Image: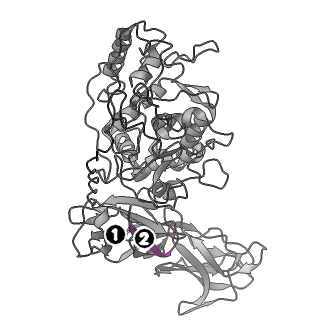
Amino acid sequence: MAAHFGRRLRKGAATTAVAAAAVAALSASQAPGATIGDPGGRAAPDATSAPGESTDDPGATGNSPYYTDLPPLNSPNPAPSASTDPLTPGASEAGIPATVLDAYKKAEAALRESKPGCNLPWQLLAAIGKVESGQARGGRVDADGTTLSPIIGPQLDGNGFALIRDTDNGEYDGNSAYDNAVGPMQFIPSTWKWAGRDGNGDGRKDPNNIYDAALAAGHYLCRFGWDLSDRADLDKAILSYNPSRDYLNTVLSWLEYYRKGTHEIPDGTGTLPGGRSDDRTTSPSPSSPSSPSSPSSPSAPSTAPGTTPAAPGTSPKPSPSPDTPGGGSSSPGPKPPASSPGTPSTPPGTTQPPTAPPPSRPPTPTDTVDHLENAGTGRLTARAGDAFTERIRARAETGEGKAVAKVRIRFTVLGDTDTTFTGGESVTTVVTDSAGVAVAPALRAGEKTGDVTVRATVVGRIVPGLDYRATVTERTADTVVRTGDEALTCTPGGEFAHRVEVRATHDGAPAGKVAATATLITSADDPAVNDEGPYFKDDDGKAVRTLNGLETDEDGLLTLPQLYADDTTGTYLLRVTTAGGATLTVELTVAAAGTASPGPTSGS
């Protein structure tokens, strides 16, 4: 980080001591434990854990490395003028490339419509975009928002990162052995498969398109019914993206910074962060003020953060690929010579002692899973619009039938259905408990009736999935009554003065969206359609005596169309029947003017 801070401070720092003091001040005032927006710098309370947070839950990014740079001390306002020095802290950091900024704001607008209770601020997307990819590598995107070259993180092979074996056959990351985080918001392929969205309307879901990635990130952060205006839910959402406390505090720092103000800059001109979460080497100690390698010296050669300067006489490692998040690369570059200058090499004829093979990596819990078993899930049935009372349970087992804890199980609702898990998502991931059991969130039935399949699979391991069948039945009513008691009378050839309105209920509660039919029947004992007497009209004005496809509203109310009478007189019956078998029979009277008519009767 020393070189990065040196670049920020070299205009105002005349000596290494000044630069070091500035670094200390910045670190102290913006330490990860500082409360955002608290001028007193009091320590923040421990963030609430995200659902399923554990060492086996890598979040959206697979625990890929991220940029650790913190915002500058000075306020981002006002926006810089054309003459502002681009190296001025705040002026450059507060600028967000135009296309990237537009993608964040469009995603916020879309989520405001689809999930208004989430209260997603676009500044949160900007904060995550800054930490994950430096705003798409400083805005290196085309007019449609697609990065000029793919942004691929290191392969997640368990060597310093999460272990996630290939899930996409290299479709997104070009790696058929392990997964890599992809795109400006750094989604791992298995997460993108269900979280991906088409944000720019081109018919594709591309993780390397900032519009698609920003919208996907918004939906990811808004699942489980989280309200991001609530600090506890905000913490949960960010931790679900990357279950790291340092990550949480870094994102919150940028969120608060962007909330204070930002401005649009041309694509491709954004500043690139320097520090990365997987930097493991120690930067060299600052040299004397007169040394040409001082970070405060404008002519000092820069050393990439996290790398060790090459020894004199050796060839330095090539610079990291510019399209790898954090400046890293998924494949190592050539190594420098094994011996340092001045160190004698092995004398000729001397045999080097054999090098011990590196120790093998112990298997993870995921490696030991052989199959999944149903952990006692009962019958899954619910009416349309209702929550299923039974929840899906899957148990991870070894080949010997032993339970495997701390394994991520993904539950996916398959097929053309609007049934989802609580929160509106069709995919959810749950970590198995000490008994090896993962319990999925409750299912909520949609409006489409019929059978629904939910598949459980092991994340990071190829074993047969386990399918569960859930059945969605139609909405029903057990009672239907008239809402009024007016006599329903009419003169021959006229129209009835009052329209028939009914209310349907189920277990005493309004039965909304329940299907119903209305038929003018021959008699109470003969439900055949009457061919004379009162009638409805179709769109062409022709008489019809049966209405299908009726439906109660949200309050269980149904108002029938206008009724008319032909030239015959007498007493007639109208029967209303709802899904579930509830019926109501209403008496209609057609009589000449001045003729007394009996009051209405009804029956169930």
- The percent coordinates of residue 96 (x first, y second) are 56, 29
Quick check: 540 left or right of 178? Answer: right
Res 138 seen here: yes
- Give the residue displayed 48% in from the left and 20% down from the top: 301
Q: State the SS at label 1.
A: loop
Quarter-of-image position of residue 174: bottom right
Quadrant where the image shows the N terminus = top left
- The percent coordinates of residue 302 (x first, y second) are 47, 22
557 or 111: nearer the viewer? 111
Q: On residue 392, which mark appears? A: 1
Q: On residue 74, which mark appears? A: none
User: Disc 1 vs disc 2: Cβ atoms closer than 8 Å?
Assistant: yes
- Give the residue displayed 36% in from the left and 19% down from the top: 26
Residue range of the region highlighted in magenta in the rendering: 444-459
Res 476 seen here: no
Amino acid carrying label 1: it is Ile
Dot 2 corresponds to which residue? 454
- Give the residue displayed 67% in from the left and 40% down from the top: 142
In the figure, 274 relative to 19: above or below? below
Examine the structure image and report whether residue 64 is included in the region drawn in magenta.
no
Q: Main secondary structure of the magenta part?
A: strand
Residue that protrudes farthest toward the bottom in the picture: 526
- Give the residue displayed 75% in from the left and 77% down from the top: 493
Q: State the SS at label 2.
A: strand
360 or 497: nearer the viewer? 360
